[in-house]
């Protein structure tokens, strides 16, 4: 078995240029894999999360949201964990990533809103990877997960 | 250098604490190094650019040994099976690594000189193979322009490593011969003998993989000391072999047994040339718009990265390349 890197250091976001800390105390996750401000990621993993085997290394855009519950991570569940769907802008690979504690909630909402504008197209490409994206009917779930209750927040940040 | 034609010629087979065993005409001589040749050899070894040899420098380089196993040397015989090395002849090849003495300047440690091939030895299990370490050995061998034959020992434990075939295939596809052997059952020993015939080969690998056991299996009369790996979960070796020694093989050729090396740094390899030392990458170097200055990291359209994504280069090997590049 090839060894996996134990931890990854702080990084500068390739999309917005902000220096991002990977400290667990700040992010609440062990493996920070996207910028908490713009939510963009980088295509570094190939076979498994954290293997850092991908040679693509292109930016990954947050294209939608999905739910994960239990071992079946691609199954949409009403009370699962809200996840970001990232799409590689070069090789079009999709991956799902946990939302960190310090991720900007309004930006998450704006990603969700934008995903609704190309609902059918997004649904098609996500389903090819076995990912079920959230749609307009899941608005309440998204708000409840992010804010604890369903409140409409005006979206002012565009991704 | 001293070039007295009357001096005898021999090959260094073993060295221990300033004493060198030189083989010459079927005899063994216990030799020391003449102070003059030691001085002549040690300064260029420690720092080729140095013009001033201060006392501090001498202290720092006291660990440098200018003679390596495999060196062809001239000697003066002193009788009673003893002698003094007066000259070291130019080396045809040399396998080197940076010597690690804490707090001191890094200097070259020639592991073996005049070798014909390198045999990185790994075990199927106990200890589990470290493929990143194999890549290091292979790169060092490529840098020394030595061919490599990968030896996977303990193949009788194959059921304990389900991903072995997949990993081996990566190296076979590149063109490295891979021999599956077992010092216990004797499997693959004949193929190994054929690979060793008529050549000076070097066994390298971490402790406990069975380098000395292989040597005993190849030539049972040697009866070299071996130990079982530790009983712990990781199956680590116990560093049984503690010195370098060359052995003449009955079926022609010679083999250098080395102590287990868990660390193997790269010596005098430039960042720019590293990709050439990965044979499967070499053909893609300079093929993108960044030319020879491409680092194959995040450059858009890099031909090496494209080849990795297309499956022509293993992502594991690419990762090894990136790790080694960070070190240089």
Image (cartoon, rainbow, N blue to C red):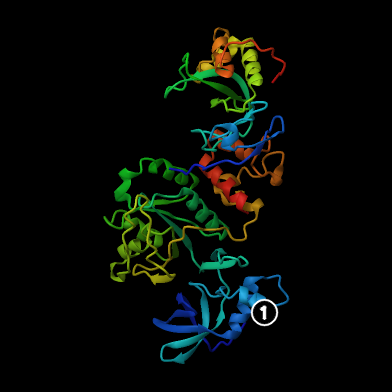
Please say whether residue B3 is visible from this viewpoint: no
Image coordinates of residue B131 in percent, x first then y, are 46, 48
Residue that lies at the very extreme toward the left in this rendered image: B185
Image coordinates of residue B65 in percent, x first then y, are 55, 74
Q: Which residue is mark 1?
A: B55
Q: Mark 1 falls on what kind of element? A: helix
Residue that lies at the very extreme toward the front in this rendered image: A148
Q: Residue at x 65, y 38 (%)?
A: A11
Residue that lies at the very extreme toward the top in this rendered image: A137
B62 or B48, which is in the foreground?
A: B62
Count of marks placed on residues: 1
Image coordinates of residue B68 in percent, x first then y, are 51, 72
Rendered image quadrant of residue B45: bottom right
Please say whether residue B160 is visible from this viewpoint: yes
Q: Residue at x 64, y 30 (%)?
A: A35
Q: Is residue A110 above or below residue B258?
A: above
Q: Quadrant of the C terminus of chain B?
A: bottom right
B248 or A4, which is in the foreground?
A: A4
Q: Is residue B83 above or below residue B197?
A: below
Q: Residue at x 34, y 67 (%)?
A: B251
| Circle 1 chain | B
Q: Is residue A103 above or below residue A149?
A: below
Q: Quadrant of the N terminus of chain B?
A: bottom right
Q: What crowding class fits label 1: few (fewer than 14 Cα within 10 Å), some (14-19), or many (20 or more)?
A: few
Rendered image quadrant of residue A34: top right
Q: Is residue B289 above or below residue B250?
A: above
């Amino acid at each position: 078995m090839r060894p996996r890197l134990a931890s990854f250091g702080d990084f500068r976001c390739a999309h917005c240029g902000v220096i991002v800390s990977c400290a667990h105390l700040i992010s609440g996750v062990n493996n920070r894999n996207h910028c908490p401000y713009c939510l963009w990621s980088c295509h570094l993993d190939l076979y498994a999360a954290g293997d850092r085997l991908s040679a693509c290394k292109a930016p990954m855009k947050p294209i939608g949201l999905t739910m994960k519950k239990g071992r079946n991570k691609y199954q949409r569940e009403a009370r699962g964990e809200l996840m970001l769907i990232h799409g590689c802008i070069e090789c079009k690979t999709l991956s799902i990533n946990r939302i960190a504690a310090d991720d900007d909630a309004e930006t998450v909402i704006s990603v969700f809103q934008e995903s609704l504008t190309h609902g059918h197209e997004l649904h098609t490409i996500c389903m090819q990877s076995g990912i079920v994206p959230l749609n307009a009917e899941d608005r309440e779930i998204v708000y409840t997960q992010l804010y604890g209750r369903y409140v409409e927040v005006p979206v002012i940040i565009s991704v | 250098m001293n070039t007295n034609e009357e001096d005898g010629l021999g090959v260094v087979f073993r060295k221990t604490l300033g004493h060198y065993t030189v083989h010459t005409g079927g005899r063994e001589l216990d030799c020391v190094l003449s102070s003059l040749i030691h001085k002549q050899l040690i300064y260029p070894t420690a720092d080729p650019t140095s013009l001033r040899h201060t006392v501090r420098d001498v202290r720092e380089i006291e660990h440098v040994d200018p003679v390596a196993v495999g060196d062809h040397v001239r000697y003066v015989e002193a009788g009673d099976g003893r002698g003094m090395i007066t000259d070291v002849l130019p080396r045809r090849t040399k396998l080197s690594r940076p010597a690690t003495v804490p707090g001191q300047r890094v200097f070259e440690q020639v592991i073996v000189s005049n070798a014909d091939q390198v045999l990185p030895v790994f075990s199927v299990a106990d200890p589990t193979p470290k493929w990143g370490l194999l890549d290091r050995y292979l790169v060092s061998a490529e840098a020394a322009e030595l061919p490599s034959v990968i030896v996977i020992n303990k193949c009788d434990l194959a059921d304990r490593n389900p991903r072995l075939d997949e990993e081996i295939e990566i190296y076979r596809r590149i063109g490295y011969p891979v021999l599956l052997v077992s010092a216990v059952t004797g499997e693959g020993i004949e193929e190994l003998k054929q690979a060793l015939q008529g050549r000076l080969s070097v066994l390298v690998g971490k402790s406990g993989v069975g380098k000395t056991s292989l040597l005993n299996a190849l030539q049972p009369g040697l009866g070299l000391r071996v130990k079982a790996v530790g009983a712990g979960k990781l199956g680590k070796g116990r560093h049984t072999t503690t010195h370098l020694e060359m052995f003449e093989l009955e079926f022609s050729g010679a083999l250098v047994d080395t102590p287990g090396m868990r660390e193997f740094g790269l010596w005098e390899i430039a960042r720019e040339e590293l990709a050439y030392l990965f044979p499967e990458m070499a053909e893609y170097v300079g093929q993108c718009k960044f030319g020879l200055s491409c680092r194959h990291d995040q450059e858009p359209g890099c031909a090496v990265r494209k080849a990795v994504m297309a499956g022509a280069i293993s992502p594991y090997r690419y990762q090894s390349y990136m790790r080694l590049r960070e070190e240089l």
